[in-house]
Amino acid sequence: MDEFTLNDHASNPGEKGFAGNTRQQLPVVNWLADIPESQCETDLVEIQFKNTRKGYFVNSTHIPIEKGDVVVVESNPGHDIGVVTLMGRLVLDQIKKNKINIERYEIRRVYRKVKAVDMEKYNEAKAREQDTMIRARQIAKDMNLAMKIGDVEFQGDGTKAIFYYIADERVDFRQLIKVFAEEFRVRIEMKQIGARQEAGRIGGIGPCGRELCCTTWMSNFSSVSTNAARCQDLSTNPLKLAGQCAKIKCCVNFEMAMYQDAQKDFPRKDIHLETVEGTWFLCKSDTFRRLLTYSSSHSVMANLQTISVERALEVIAMNRNGEKPDTLVVSETREKAVEYQNVVGQDSLTRFDKEKTPNRHRNNRRRNNNRQSNNTKQ
């Protein structure tokens, strides 16, 4: 049978357990692929369509399919074409992870493996998506609707189109659907998505140089606040914090728990330290080295003094008792930041280029041998 791929390999999940194509969105590694018993636990299979849309279908007729096969599945109306991304025991785990109630979920069937005729209809439908999206945006603009159409996805048989849109407020698009149906002659489905989901569907490269997390592995999006950036002493400049979705980057949340755990015993930022020299204000903190930098001025960074967290807590305890230390930094044990030291010289690129010291015993042995040979000749 001929092999078919969807979207120029963009939805091809590879073979067996591991995704062979890095361009696949939201890949899942079937680490139980080498265990035949796990593949027969359920008839449910996970099918992926365009970008990040996935669905769960039942292989009731037990068609011999494997991960990576392009199949025709039941839809409403008609049929759709997708690629098998997961089979066996892990499908049940994915359903549980995505919090899908299998009793209320309408499970449709897998019809067959895709044929050449099915692929012709599929390619014709996909060729209409770009022009349809541009025309739909123009129609929504003419109707003065506060919405943005981010993507259009045609069903595999071309009888239905899903319009993904973004809107800050509720939009009454009943008239819009009628205009779309007359214009495009297909069944219309409107699906609202968030800005983060739109970025995941479109894809791109983040400032770290890697593919966007929402494109490669993230499926659940939690809100990110500026408090997470302040906790990590990051700049609150929106231009630096915003990702490609114009929202705060999701990766700001990744390390927040580690920072919060490390800062449990840190003094509050609004607590000032009173000494005989004057009042000191916190201006900077180094969380993992447990160092705090205080300034003698509240508005500018002046006369900076760096102390440890333990010293700051000691001064705060003295202030509560009505006492003031002479200086912020203890003069006898002047606290300094411990810099990294290359003790063993392992960072030197020329550590193996040193000349070897001559072996004295070997040289002495050579001299004695030469003398003996000279004596025998004489």
Image (spheres, rainbow, N blue to C red):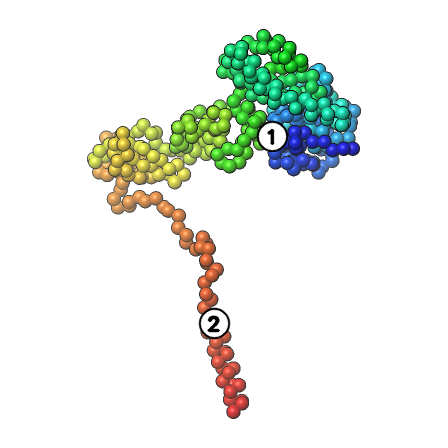
> Where residue 77 sits in the image (x, y, percent)?
71, 15
Q: Which mark is residue 26?
A: 1
Gap between marks 1 and 2, in whole Å? 63 Å
Report the side of 265 relative to 149 (left or right).
Answer: left
- Can residue 87 be seen from the camera position used here? no
Q: Which residue is rendered at x = 55% and y = 13% of the image?
A: 140
For the image, the number of numbered tags is 2
Q: Which mark is residue 359?
A: 2
Q: Nearer the viewer, mark 1 or mark 2?
A: 1
Residue type at mark 1: give it: Leu
- The quadrant holding residue 214 is top right
Residue type at mark 2: give it: Asn
Q: Which residue is rendered at x = 32% and y = 44% of the image?
A: 336
Report the side of 200 relative to 65 (left or right).
Answer: left
Residue contact between numbered discs 1 and 2, judged by CB atoms under 8 Å:
no
Sequence-wise first label, 1 or 2: 1
Front residue of 127 and 30: 127
- Can residue 206 be seen from the camera position used here? yes
Outermost residue on the top side: it is: 175
Above or below 79: residue 2 = below
Tell me the element at label 1. Answer: loop
Outermost residue on the bottom side: it is: 378
- The quadrant holding residue 70 is top right
Q: Counting other residues with Cα less than 10 Å from the Cα at mark 2, is it few (<14), some (14-19), or many (20 or more)?
A: few
Above or below 180: residue 229 = below
Q: Which residue is rendered at x = 74% and y = 33% of the image?
A: 3
> Where residue 356 sits in the image (x, y, percent)?
47, 66
Quadrant of the rendering where the N terminus is positioned: top right
Report the side of 216 relative to 4 (left or right).
Answer: left
> Where residue 245 sits in the image (x, y, percent)?
50, 25
